[in-house]
Image (cartoon, helix red, strand yellow):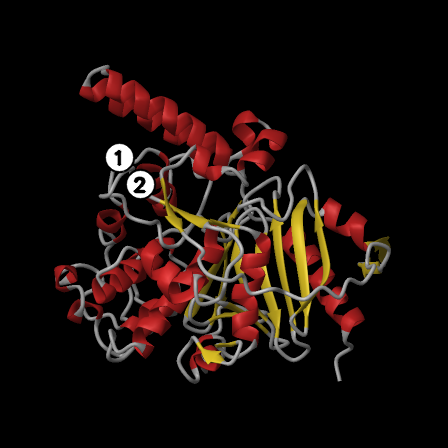
């Protein structure tokens, strides 16, 4: 999940939806759908259990249901409400050297108003922030009872993790080429909207498949139904739902942000490796990077048959988010060992001519690329992993915004992060 609302910006062949609407109706709709399904199938103990679990899951994802404070706390305890699969750390922890700088009173001026950094972060509903400069932790702070062990849910920042697993599978030879059609690895996608779509096109969300990533509509939208039926109610498999949408543009001709498209990429990784997505993440990244804490990826149902929702909801500690960002800032090399294929980071975070969703942002391989050369993994309610390679700054920020996506909150967040980087190392 990413930007929440129903305004569209057009740029050339590409359309980017910018989401601003409240998500309250989405989860209320989910509850109503759950009740209808239960009544349609008969009131059974299993049906009521689904309803109760769905209600708790819906509340954890929407502050309008049980209030902002409850929602804030739920964002760092999602595994209490959702089935998940553990991503285990192992071996020595890769220490992030501390070089603390007192930034609490750093003045941050936005729209002519100057406030200290701590106030800016609090106003932006920040739950935690880790700032790395040249690989060292220079600033780390938490709010609302969170700490360095808290596992925050990523929402759509998980998309960047999934895309990176595609890159590693490519480097391992499990995927021959990004220009291979998806059906080469997933023949069951023949005669779906993804028939004839290449891996590269899916990485850039340019499949041409129709998908409405708008939240908060009374009648529901594609992303509403996809997330509600798979993640919230566990009534339909995420893989099956992801490929039910028709194509309305030629592959490669049109950008359309599509959470279900990342599910197809996750399915690709599973087919190429023979592993669950959590297992691939553990083997390819979590253990090689010496992550500090176990992570957990939310599933579309409990048990061995559960499938990770690839475009959402990897739960991990902020320092481990920051390590993932630092791997990219280091060009895919970690402590002298190449983890990502040569050239992957430059390709995954570059810009392709004519593929410009907006003047500020460009979407490459599941990363948002900004005009100043920085790039970010972004998720609803203000989850960010921001990387400025020019100044070797990586910032991981977990938040609990009052609605899923708000342009003003986003602009304030990026202005704050840029001001931190400016203070640490002014642009040349």
Instruction: State the mark number for residue 235.
Output: 1
Residue 414 spot, x, y in % from top left:
67, 61
- How many numbered circles does the render carry? 2
64 sits left or right of 204 in the view: right
Q: Which residue is mark 2?
A: 230
Q: Nearer the viewer, residue 1 or 97?
A: 97
Using the rendered view, name the quadrant where residue 261 is placed.
bottom left
Label 1 and label 2: CA atoms lie apart by 6 Å
Give the vertical position of 19 relative to 233 (above or below).
below
348 sits left or right of 68 in the view: left
Q: Nearer the viewer, residue 64 or 317?
A: 317
Q: Are marks 1 and 2 in contact (CB under 8 Å)?
A: yes
Mark with earlier residue (1, 2): 2
Q: Secondary structure at mark 2?
A: helix
Residue at left 37%, top 27%? 53
Give the vertical position of 278 relative to 339 (above or below).
above
User: Quadrant where the C terminus lies?
Assistant: bottom right
Residue 77 spot, x, y in % from top left:
51, 37
Residue at left 64%, top 41%? 146
Residue 133 spot, x, y in % from top left:
69, 70
């Amino acid at each position: 999940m990413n930007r929440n609302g129903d305004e569209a910006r057009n740029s050339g062949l590409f359309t980017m939806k910018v989401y601003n609407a409240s998500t309250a109706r989405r989860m209320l709709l989910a509850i109503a759908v759950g009740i209808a399904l239960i009544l349609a199938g008969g009131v059974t103990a299993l049906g009521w259990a689904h309803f109760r679990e769905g209600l708790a899951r819906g509340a954890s994802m929407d502050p309008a249901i049980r209030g902002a404070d409850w929602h804030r706390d739920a964002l760092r305890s999602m595994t209490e409400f959702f089935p998940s699969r553990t991503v285990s750390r192992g071996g020595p922890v890769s220490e992030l050297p501390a070089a603390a700088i007192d930034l609490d009173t750093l003045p941050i001026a936005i729209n002519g108003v100057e406030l200290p950094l701590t106030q800016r972060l609090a106003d932006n509903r920040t739950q935690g922030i880790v700032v790395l400069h040249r690989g060292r932790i220079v600033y780390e702070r938490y709010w609302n009872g969170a700490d360095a062990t808290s596992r925050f849910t990523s929402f759509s920042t998980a998309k960047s993790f999934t895309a990176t697993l595609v890159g590693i599978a490519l480097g391992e030879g499990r995927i021959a080429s990004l220009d291979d059609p998806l059906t080469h690895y997933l023949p069951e996608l023949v005669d779906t909207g993804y028939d004839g779509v290449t891996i590269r096109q899916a990485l850039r969300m340019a499949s041409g498949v129709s998908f409405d990533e708008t939240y908060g509509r009374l009648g529901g939208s594609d992303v509403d139904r996809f997330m509600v039926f798979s993640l919230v109610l566990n009534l339909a498999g995420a893989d099956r739902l992801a490929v039910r949408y028709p194509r309305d543009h030629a592959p490669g001709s049109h950008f359309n942000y599509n959470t279900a498209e990342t599910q197809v990429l996750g399915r690709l990784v599973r087919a190429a490796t023979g592993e669950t997505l959590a297992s691939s993440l553990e083997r390819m990244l979590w253990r090689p990077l010496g992550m500090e804490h176990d992570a957990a990826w939310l599933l579309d149902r409990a048990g061995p048959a559960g499938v990770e929702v690839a475009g959402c909801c990897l739960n991990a500690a902020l320092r481990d988010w920051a390590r993932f960002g630092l791997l990219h800032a280091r060009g895919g090399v970690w402590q002298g060992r190449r983890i990502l294929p040569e050239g992957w980071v430059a390709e995954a975070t570059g810009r392709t001519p004519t593929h410009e969703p907006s003047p500020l942002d460009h979407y490459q391989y599941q990363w948002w690329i900004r005009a100043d050369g920085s790039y970010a993994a972004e998720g609803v309610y203000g989850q960010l992993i921001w990387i400025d390679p020019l100044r070797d700054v990586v910032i991981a920020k977990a938040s609990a915004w009052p609605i899923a996506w708000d342009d003003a909150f986003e602009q304030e967040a990026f202005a704050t992060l840029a001001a931190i980087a400016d203070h640490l190392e002014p642009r040349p």
